[in-house]
Amino acid sequence: MISHSKSNQQRQSLSHLTHKAKIQHFHAMWISDVHLGSIDCKAEFLLHFLNHSQSDYLYLVGDIVDVWALKKRVYWPDSHKKVIKKILELASNGTQVVFIPGNHDEAFKAYADSHFRGVTLAKQHIHESITGKRFLMLHGDQFDSQVCVSRVYAKLGDHLYDVLLWLNRQLHAIRSTMGYPYWSLASYIKLRVNKAQQAINQYRDAVLRYAAKKQVDMVVCGHIHQPELSEHSMNQQPLIYANDGDWVENCTLIAETLEGDVQLLKWNEQTLQAETVSNIQFARQDDNKTTHQKQHVA
Ligand SMILES: [Mn+2]
């Protein structure tokens, strides 16, 4: 514990004493799956992050507003309103804001290629990085049919554990009266977790296959609430998979730094900063085109 807080102190030597979070500067930021309008949304954390960061480009990669949740019951606290207000404020103050609707806010898909108060709506978008690379972004719900995870199954996942625990108690009681041996909940969960991992892998593969056809250097998506930044090879070409996670449980984002690196960052409640989880360095186009490829071969 002590060494952990020490390293935080070192990292924030300037701001630690005053407890004021310093402004984090990026070239571009990708955020998705905020689910404003749902009880589980961590709007206050996101608001703090947006108030203490600055970027030339802000990409909203879908499921920003949870229209499904709002249809069930209206939940729209002040912090949720403030996130929308902050985004519109950024858009009118020079930040290029692009919004790619997801499945929870698909009502906005009808307005693709239009502009609203400085925010550009699009179904897909390509970002030109400062190192001259092309980053394709999409929400990712278009691959649901390939992943074999239905909406019903995805929703079931949230409460599956609670249901399982309850079910296990009932089942065990019934089984023991009938003389059956104990049925292992642990192995059942393991099987489910394994299935979840399979779905994540299938999703990543589908996204990568699609992006490879578009001949881009990186693909940024969201949708499955599973943050990841990983390097792959598709048809002998390097391709980066970047999933920006969510602001329901992970509180993560993908960012391009002012130096042109790509990072996966995770919001830290203690330090009030988004901290780097992983980093990929890009060589500038004019330096040496093959540097990045060399990293893959090595
Ligand atoms: Mn989604």
Image (cartoon, helix red, strand yellow):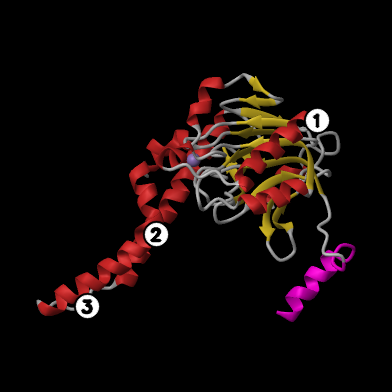
Above or below, 227 relative to 119: below
Above or below, 145 relative to 187: above
- The first of marks 2 and 3 along the sequence is 3
Report how far apart the C-alphas of labels 2 and 3 lie in the structure.
22 Å
Q: In terms of secondary structure, where does tag 3 sit?
A: loop
* Mark 3 burial class by Cα count in 10 Å: few <14, some 14-19, many 20+: few
Q: In terms of secondary structure, where does tag 1 sit?
A: loop
> Which mark is in front, 2 or 3?
3
Residue visible at 59% across and 53% down in the picture:
42
**Is residue 11 covered in magenta?**
yes
Residue visible at 70% across and 33% down in the picture:
88
* Amino acid at dot 3: Tyr
Label 2 residue near ligand 1, CB within 8 Å: no
Residue visible at 84% across and 55% down in the picture:
22
Q: Relative to the observer, which residue lies in front, 172 or 207? A: 172
The image's mark for residue 182 is 3
Quickly name the residue at label 1.
94
Q: Quadrant of residue 257?
A: top right
- The answer to whether mark 2 and mark 3 are in CB contact below 8 A is no
Q: Relative to the observer, which residue lies in front, 243 or 287? A: 243
**Is residue 265 covered in magenta?**
no
The image's mark for residue 194 is 2
- The first of marks 3 and 1 along the sequence is 1
Q: Is residue 217 left or right of residue 153?
A: right
> Which mark is in front, 3 or 1?
1
